[in-house]
């Protein structure tokens, strides 16, 4: 029987080429499908954390929930309830904080992350206009913008590590320093709190209460690093537009007694057109009235406010933002730790401390009685030896309690109330499903002892643990 001869193998035969191409195509499609499946899986399978603690304080209601669990998926809160009624999801990372009390991440509604004023010597202070502030402010302005952002990044991280997970930066960051830092934090390049950035402050062109009599050859260039000046309605509108060009989150305007209601209205109208709120630095009765009549969203500081103005703010829904930075002996202690003080200067500071504290006690009583909506900011931009920026900032929150405000209202002022004032009540300010997992923990009961806010032991922002000493 004749055995058929095997044909020699042809590497370039059309049949082989087609077969190889077909198999290669199938393999390629399989690889693409697997890659797409893996990518989809990565997108849908967000990391899950199961957080347990002894207590959870809901600032809005004042209720305390015992033996709680919080399920966090990705950067959002998915479920909150009794630990006995919630099972840890499969594969979840479990964090047990023992007897700690959970709170929403703290919110500083009024801060200056790009300034850290070192008090000058007594003789230097006495020979300058606004002698405490101006020298350091001018030094900051002449710094490289890059250096200022790096310094701001450090102070922002120190705020976060102390439990402040959201800040509203209201000026003194150069042209766009706080905007650049906000974007870098949001992109995950650096670690820091959520930032609402204001860019440059708007202020009267002809009368700037921060600095005076600058060298005319340099003054315009120096001031333009920090301020957008305006005189008149059209200039006020243009100043808002220039700031909005940099994608700010809030417009901050310093109102003097000679700012007109028409200018204020133009600022508010232009900002609101882009759904941006307006925060107004106003201290005197005249400037506060201009802010109210102009339709501001919040009055910052407001030390000279009257009962009638508080009533108007309440009726219009305008927030009062407390800034009790110098309440008590804060300034005197800071000065003593920084510079040599004469006996006469020290006596004068102590007199000022007593007078200012009494005035602020009265302010807190009147605001609480009025029913106006309020929040709290630190107005922090001061260097305190031996403390981080964050430690100094959280140390100012309890001062409202010292001034007569109930502890729960103080906590609301830096959580739920603050979130509403910022327009972020759907994102932060409470430990609730759907909100960002911005959570802090303290060892004790902050309602019984408000100073617990100065001893935050655990910090989480967007589901990521920043600090855990619990």
Image (spheres, rainbow, N blue to C red):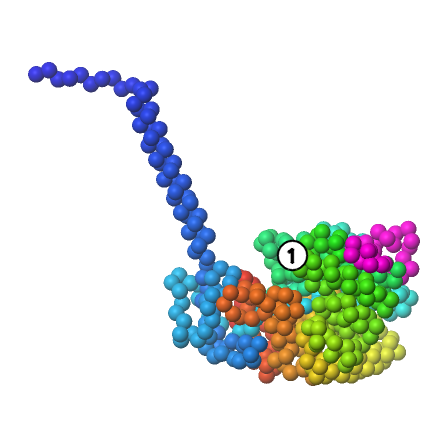
User: Quadrant of the image for the N terminus?
Assistant: top left
Image quadrant where residue 316 sits: bottom right
Of residues 326 and 254, the one drawn nearer to the viewer in this rendering? 254
Say whether residue 366 is left or right of residue 207. left
User: Residue at 80% across / 77% down in the picture?
Assistant: 304
Image quadrant where residue 132 sits: bottom right
The residue tagged 1 is 182
Q: Residue 207: x, y in percent?
A: 88, 62
The question of residue 218 being in magenta is answered with yes
The question of residue 37 being in magenta is answered with no
Of residues 372 and 7, the one drawn nearer to the viewer in this rendering? 372
Q: Residue 66: x, y in percent?
A: 47, 79
Q: Which residues are magenta?
A: 211-239
Q: Residue 37: x, y in percent?
A: 40, 47
User: Residue at 56% across / 71% down in the picture?
Assistant: 430
Q: Residue 80: x, y in percent?
A: 47, 71
Say whether residue 407 is left or right of residue 234. left
């Amino acid at each position: 029987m004749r055995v058929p001869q095997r044909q020699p193998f042809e590497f370039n035969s059309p049949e082989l080429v087609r077969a190889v191409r077909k198999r290669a195509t199938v393999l390629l499609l399989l690889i693409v499908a697997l890659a797409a499946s893996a990518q989809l899986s990565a997108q849908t399978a967000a990391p899950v954390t199961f957080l347990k603690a002894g207590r959870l304080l809901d600032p809005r209601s004042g209720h305390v929930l015992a033996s709680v669990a919080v399920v966090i998926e990705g950067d959002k809160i998915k479920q909150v309830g009794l630990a006995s009624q919630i099972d840890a999801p499969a594969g979840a990372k479990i964090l047990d904080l023992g007897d700690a009390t959970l709170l929403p991440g703290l919110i500083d509604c009024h801060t200056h992350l790009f300034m850290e004023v070192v008090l000058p010597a007594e003789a230097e202070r006495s020979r300058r206009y606004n002698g405490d502030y101006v020298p350091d402010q001018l030094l900051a302005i002449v710094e490289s913008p890059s250096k200022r952002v790096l310094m701001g990044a450090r102070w922002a991280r120190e705020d976060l590590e102390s439990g402040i997970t959201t800040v509203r930066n209201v000026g003194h960051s150069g042209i766009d320093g706080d905007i650049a830092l906000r974007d870098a934090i949001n992109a995950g390049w650096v670690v820091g709190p959520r930032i609402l950035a204001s860019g440059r402050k708007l202020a009267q062109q002809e009368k700037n209460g921060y600095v005076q009599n600058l060298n005319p050859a340099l003054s315009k260039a120096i001031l333009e690093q920090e301020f957008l000046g305006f005189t008149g309605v059209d200039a006020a509108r243009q100043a808002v537009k220039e700031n909005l060009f940099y994608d700010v989150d809030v417009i901050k305007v310093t109102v003097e007694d000679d700012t007109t209601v028409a200018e204020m209205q133009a600022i508010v109208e232009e900002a609101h057109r882009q759904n941006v709120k307006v925060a107004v630095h106003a201290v005197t009765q005249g400037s506060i009235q201009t802010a109210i009549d102009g339709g501001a969203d919040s009055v910052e500081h407001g030390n000279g406010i009257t009962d009638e103005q508080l009533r108007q703010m309440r009726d219009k829904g305008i927030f009062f933002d407390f800034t009790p930075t110098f309440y008590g002996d804060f300034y005197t202690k800071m000065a003593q730790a920084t510079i040599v003080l004469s006996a006469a200067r020290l006596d004068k500071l102590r007199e000022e401390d007593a007078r200012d504290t009494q005035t602020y006690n009265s302010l807190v009583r009147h605001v609480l009685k009025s029913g106006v909506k309020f929040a709290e900011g630190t107005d922090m931009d001061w260097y305190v030896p031996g403390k981080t920026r964050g430690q100094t900032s959280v140390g100012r929150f309890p001062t409202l309690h010292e001034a007569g405000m109930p502890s729960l209202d103080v906590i609301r002022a830096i959580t739920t109330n603050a979130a509403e004032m910022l327009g972020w009540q759907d994102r932060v300010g409470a430990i609730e499903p759907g909100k960002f997992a911005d959570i802090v923990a303290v060892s004790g009961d902050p309602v019984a002892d408000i100073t617990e806010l100065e001893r935050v032991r655990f910090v989480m922002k967007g589901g990521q643990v920043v600090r855990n000493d619990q």
